[in-house]
Amino acid sequence: MRTIAVANQKGGVGKTTTALSLSAALAELGHHVLLVDFDPQANATTGLGLNAAELSATVYTVLLSGDPVAAAIRSTAEHNLSLLPSSIDLAGAELELAGMNQRERVLERTLGTLDGSWDYIIIDSPPSLGLLTLNVLTAAREVIVPIQSEYYALEGLTHLLRTISMVKARLNPDLALLGILVTMFDKRTILSAQVKDELVKHFGDTVFTAVIPRSVRMSEAPSYGKTILEYDALSSGAEAYRQLAKEVESREQH
């Protein structure tokens, strides 16, 4: 079982879209995938057609009320893909977790109670570097960092990588950077190509070959409660995430 976090403290970089679409693409390849929505905005939950406000069992209730994690997991319209949903209540969890013993390991302990039936656990993290994200990085073994192909994209990346190194040193020695993913790529602009070239120059093969295009279809899909693979299976966005899924398969940590 591989546990992969999708993390970036900057919002609007395609983090949740990547968590959703990569999960769906891995499921399409025949893997059993659990998507954990650990963002209080619950966009991955609504993006799979669930109303977060109507759910009685979520990752929040599992963490803080001791509900069994299996009772909160929901099946989805996509074959092989299940969801541990989030809710707005998770926004208050930072304060509640602060007083707990080994507060950075609460999510790790929760996911540790799962049986081994999942091939992949993909965790969508909040756009911050607070206690919730520390829980994600402590629970995961690999991290994907989505980076928007715009001028300010590289700002904050150093801070995030420093945080990953700190977590690796103090909390989770098994944590590894699986790859950097260029998102919202616009092939019509020189700037998008320059950002990708700059990333490759600094990080080499750590940058995924797959590039996620800027796409109207991709931005429409969540409003229908569907991933891009279900909403428009032949779109450039769906094909890009299929390529990413194959790269993720091939980069398995040994």
Image (cartoon, helix red, strand yellow):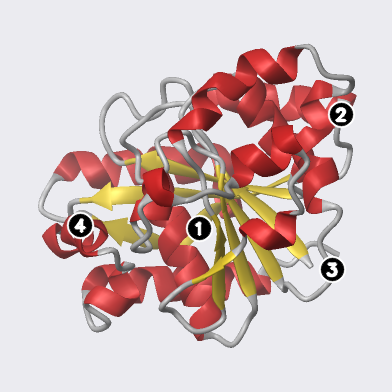
The residue tagged 3 is 115
Q: Nearer the viewer, mark 4 or mark 1?
A: 4
The residue tagged 2 is 171
Who's the residue at 41% across and 78% down the image? 77
Question: Which quadrant would the N terminus be assigned to in this image?
Answer: bottom right
Q: Earlier in the sequence, mark 1 or mark 2?
A: 2
Q: The disc labelled 2 sits on which kind of residue? A: Leu
Callout 2: few (<14), some (14-19), or many (20+) C-alpha neighbours within 10 Å? Answer: some
- With respect to residue 156, does 174 lie above or below? below
Q: Nearer the viewer, mark 2 or mark 4?
A: 4
Callout 1: few (<14), some (14-19), or many (20+) C-alpha neighbours within 10 Å? Answer: some
Q: Earlier in the sequence, mark 2 or mark 4?
A: 2
Q: Position of residue 111 (x, y in %)?
A: 78, 51
The residue tagged 4 is 223
Q: Earlier in the sequence, mark 1 or mark 3?
A: 3
- With respect to residue 29, does 11 lie above or below? above
Q: Earlier in the sequence, mark 3 or mark 2?
A: 3
Considering the numbered disc 2 on the image, is that residue within a helix, a strand or a loop?
loop
- With respect to residue 181, does 130 lie above or below? above
Considering the numbered disc 1 on the image, is that residue within a helix, a strand or a loop?
strand
**Residue 208: assigned label:** 1
Q: Nearer the viewer, mark 1 or mark 3?
A: 3
Q: The disc labelled 1 sits on which kind of residue? A: Phe
Q: Earlier in the sequence, mark 4 or mark 3?
A: 3
Who's the residue at 33% across and 63% down the image? 49
Q: Is residue 129 left or right of residue 115?
A: left
Q: Do tag 1 and tag 2 residues touch (Cβ < 8 Å)?
A: no
Mark-to-mark CA distance, 1 and 3: 30 Å
Q: The disc labelled 4 sits on which kind of residue? A: Ser
The answer to whether any part of residue 150 appears in the image is yes
Considering the numbered disc 3 on the image, is that residue within a helix, a strand or a loop?
loop
